[in-house]
Image (cartoon, helix red, strand yellow):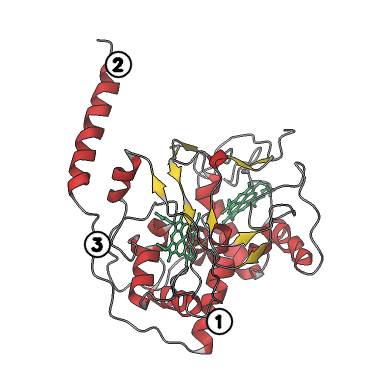
Amino acid sequence: MNRVVKGLCLGVGSLALAAGYFIVRPPKMAPPKEIRVAMTPETVARGKYLYEVVADCDGCHGERNWGKQLAPVVRSGAGFTFPAEMGLPGKVTAPNISSDPVAGIGAWSDGEKLRAIREGIGRDGRALFPMMPYQSYRQMSDRDAEALVAYLNTLPAAADQHPRTEIDFPVSVLIKGAPAPVENPVPEPADRGEYLVKMGGCADCHTPKDKGAPIAGKELAGGEVFRVGKFTVVSANISPDVETGIGRMTEAAFIKRFHDYREYQQTPLPEATQRNFTIMPWLQFSRYSAEELGAIYRYLRKQKAIANKVTVHPES
Ligand code: HEC
Ligand code: HEC
């Protein structure tokens, strides 16, 4: 048997063993926290900023108008079923997370909401598909996570019903290894830029993947292809490489790149075309202050420079 085939067999063998192990074992989980979050105007406002800007929850959970450039959110938290052309391993829905008690999560306790967001466990104890970025949200500070839940409690009810997520075997079994309880307390972050990059899912889009796993050595180097409807967009290289990344961009130019989209918050958006189509959350992130964008820039500039030339708007 040549080495390649042997390696493959070993790989499949250990996958089957791992699958067997996880089939009988529930995901790692702790009971939901017994907590009622503070519903003050300050916590709700902080939660709204986290929901709309920092974590862009509606990027997945909102109903969006894909016919317009930047695909604006039309109904917050109403849920979205990902189209088949995205090539996900099964049928995936980012559920209705509005306060509707039946279609949404209005009947969940605050502790159950916190656990789903940071620990990846559904109300019924199942492992959530880790496209829901709970592995990053684990590092969301207690103060921020509780503020987020306070805002979720105020999200207007949307009655939309979506099909439940159904992940294909063996991924359905392997994802049981993703959830884990959060060790409390989770303090405020030391590096604001690092925190915003984590919460904003920059690497989820800007690091290219092979079968769903980030490719080592290509961190933040772009090149991940996104197809939505008839349009295609490719993520940019945001590593500090001088030729192909953001190595030549000054901090001021970086901030301007985002703030230029502020005018789109007032004016009607142009129709989406192959030339302008993007899923980069420009509308959301343009709301960041210059200080916050500066912190993001300085964090990105400390990462490894990786040469990778990308055409973000391919001809077809
Ligand atoms: C990249 C896409 C994505 C982003 C961003 C995202 N989610 Fe999710 N979320 C999902 C998907 C997909 C699921 C469903 C997973 C499953 O069913 O296994 C989910 C599940 C959930 C659930 C469990 C709901 C249920 O009915 O089981 C909650 C609560 C939730 N998300 C809240 C949030 C909040 C709050 C944010 C922002 C801080 C957020 N999500 C950001 C994709 C996303
Ligand atoms: C949902 C996917 C997605 C997320 C999340 C995302 N990006 Fe992007 N980003 C893209 C795509 C696609 C492009 C290329 C198209 C464009 O420029 O709009 C892009 C372009 C950019 C550019 C322009 C680069 C250039 O050379 O002009 C910058 C800067 C950038 N992203 C930074 C970030 C940062 C910082 C974050 C996290 C805070 C982030 N992105 C999160 C998809 C994403």
Q: Nearer the viewer, residue 56 or 193?
A: 56
* Residue 59 x/y as whole percent: 58, 59
- Indicate whether 150 appears above or below 20: below
Mark 3 belongs to which amino acid?
Met
For the residue carrying disc 1, how many other residues have a C-alpha within 10 Å: few (<14), some (14-19), or many (20+)? some
Q: CA distance from mark 3 to mark 1?
A: 30 Å
Please name the residue that numbered disc 3 is placed on: 29
Q: Is residue 56 visible?
A: no
Q: Nearer the viewer, residue 148 or 97?
A: 97
Q: Looking at the rendering, in which quadrant would you find the N terminus?
A: top left
Residue located 44% across and 51% down the image? 131
Q: Is residue 178 left or right of residue 161?
A: left
* Residue 94 x/y as whole percent: 49, 57
Please name the residue that numbered disc 2 is placed on: 5
Residue located 42% across and 87% down the image? 38
Circle nearer the N terminus (2, 3)? 2
Q: Comparing marks 3 and 1, which lies closer to the viewer?
A: 3
Circle nearer the N terminus (2, 1)? 2
- Indicate whether 218 appears above or below 109: above
Most distant residue in the bottom direction: 40
For the residue carrying disc 2, how many other residues have a C-alpha within 10 Å: few (<14), some (14-19), or many (20+)? few
Q: Is residue 72 left or right of residue 114?
A: right
Q: CA distance from mark 2 to mark 3?
A: 37 Å
Mark 1 belongs to which amino acid?
Ala
CB contact under 8 Å: marks 2 and 3:
no
Q: Nearer the viewer, residue 169 or 211?
A: 169
What number is the disc on residue 45? 1
